[in-house]
Image (spheres, rainbow, N blue to C red):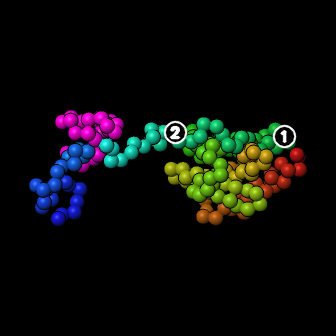
Amino acid sequence: MNVGLSDQSDDSAARPIDARRNHTNNLPWSLDAPPPRAGEARSGGVEATPVVERVPEMIHSRNTAPSKAVLAVRFFRESSGNEPVREWLQALPAEERREIGADIRAVQLSWPIGMPVVGHLGDDIWEVRTRLSHRVARVLFVLEQGEMILLHGFIKKDRKTPKPELDLARHRLRKLRSAT
């Protein structure tokens, strides 16, 4: 007996054709009509029972993120009122801002989330990792009382996170915690 996707075999004359299969493409049902419910008849009067259960439509939705944010997001604000990460983002091209914002939003909606989007750098500092078209961006943040506070953003040039960038984020974290 041949093994394959076809219902045809050496002993096909002795075996009845499975009425539940669409023999033109070997799928349980044709794609243009929903499968019949148990007890309903298809054309030809043959009762059909589903071979494969239908998957709920929500799984096929493009928007699989929860509708409510897990974390609130805010920018670190210096005593002068400047928000360095916001200013850095505004200086970037619109497409890069959109990509970085999408990754920040993914963290906001799906926390906790891991690699490749988020990495832990130690000292309560995390990074949102965004691969842009020709370079890599990082936004360093901390979690404080259900908030994702964006401490520092930069374009990464080396494989390892540069020490001055991490030191600046640590300095801002100390300032943030001393102010509260």
* Residue 80: mark: 1
What is the crowding at mark 2: few (fewer than 14 residues within 10 Å), some, or many (at least 20)? few
Examine the residues drawn in magenta and state their main secondary structure.
loop
Mark 2 or mark 1: name the one nearer the start of the chain: 2
Say which of marks 2 and 1 sits in front: 2
What is the crowding at mark 1: few (fewer than 14 residues within 10 Å), some, or many (at least 20)? few
User: Label 2, on which residue?
Assistant: 63
- Residue 24 is situated, as x and y percent measured from the top left of the image, at 19, 45
Q: Residue at x 73, y 62 (%)?
A: 122
Q: Residue at x 22, y 60 (%)?
A: 4
Residue 15 located within the stretch drawn in magenta: no
Question: Taking 13 as reference, is 45 above or below it?
Answer: above
Q: Residue at x 76, y 57 (%)?
A: 124
Residue 38 located within the stretch drawn in magenta: yes
* Residue 32: mark: none
Q: Is residue 35 left or right of residue 156?
A: left
Q: Quadrant of residue 99?
A: top right
Q: Is residue 7 left or right of residue 117?
A: left
Q: Nearer the viewer, residue 176 or 144?
A: 144
Q: CA distance from mark 2 to mark 1?
A: 39 Å
Q: Nearer the viewer, residue 66 or 105?
A: 66
Judge whether residue 34 can be spotted in this image: yes
Badge 2 amino acid: Asn
Badge 1 amino acid: Ser
Looking at the rendering, the stretch of residues picked out in magenta corresponds to 24-48
- Residue 8 is situated, as x and y percent measured from the top left of the image, at 15, 55
